[in-house]
Amino acid sequence: PYSFKELQARVKAKITRPPVPVRRLRQDRLTGVLSETAFLEELQRENGRMRPAEDIGYVACIGLSELEVMADRLGRSGDAPIIKQLIALVTFDGDDTEVLGRDSEGNILLMMPENSAEEAEKRLKGLTRRVVGHTFVVGEEMMRLTPVVGFTPLNSETSAELLYDHTM
């Protein structure tokens, strides 16, 4: 049982409450993965755990070279199906230690904290092949898109923002 007055007060409070600024959201509204800000916080936390001589842990930025053109052509929300399909491709063979995020440009951010250089390279090459072979579907259109992948090792002496910049 509920009180109608209490329900009314809660609805009114929700309506009058100012929206959360996008930069403070933990999850990307479109995809459900971490927002850029939340991802960078997680990256900084993981990066802080690293010992200087370790070569385990990588961060990658996965984008599509045609995404900006597609967003212009289809409208800002028109690229949503493309980004969702890209996330499905990224998560296809991921493991539980990986962390996903999305930046403001529509790129997918991938942290692979327990991977060696060889494992990260193998993972990203496989992902690149999967994206190249995938036919993206948007409405009635089918298209092939070109992946753009950059990655860099985690480094306890480098900030999360600088690591992110190195993947671009």
Image (tube, helix red, strand yellow):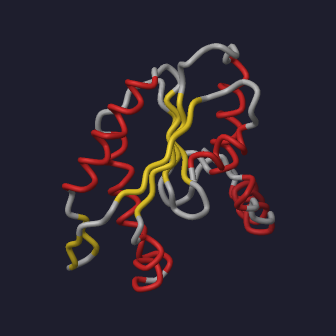
Residue 5 spot, x, y in % from top left: 75, 59
On-image quarter of the N terminus = top right
Residue 161 spot, x, y in % from top left: 72, 45
Q: Left or right: where does residue 157 sit relative to residue 153?
A: right
Q: Left or right: where does residue 90 sit relative to residue 42?
A: left
168 w.r.t. 138: above or below: above
Q: Where, by quadrant of the figure, is residue 141 drawn? A: bottom left
70 w.r.t. 93: above or below: below
Point 75% across, 64% down: residue: 19
Q: Nearer the viewer, residue 125 or 83?
A: 125
Point 66% across, 46% down: residue: 26
Point 33% across, 63% down: residue: 146
Residue 167 spot, x, y in % from top left: 57, 47
Q: Left or right: where does residue 14 sit relative to residue 113?
A: right
57 w.r.t. 93: above or below: above
9 w.r.t. 87: above or below: below
Q: Nearer the viewer, residue 164 or 19?
A: 164
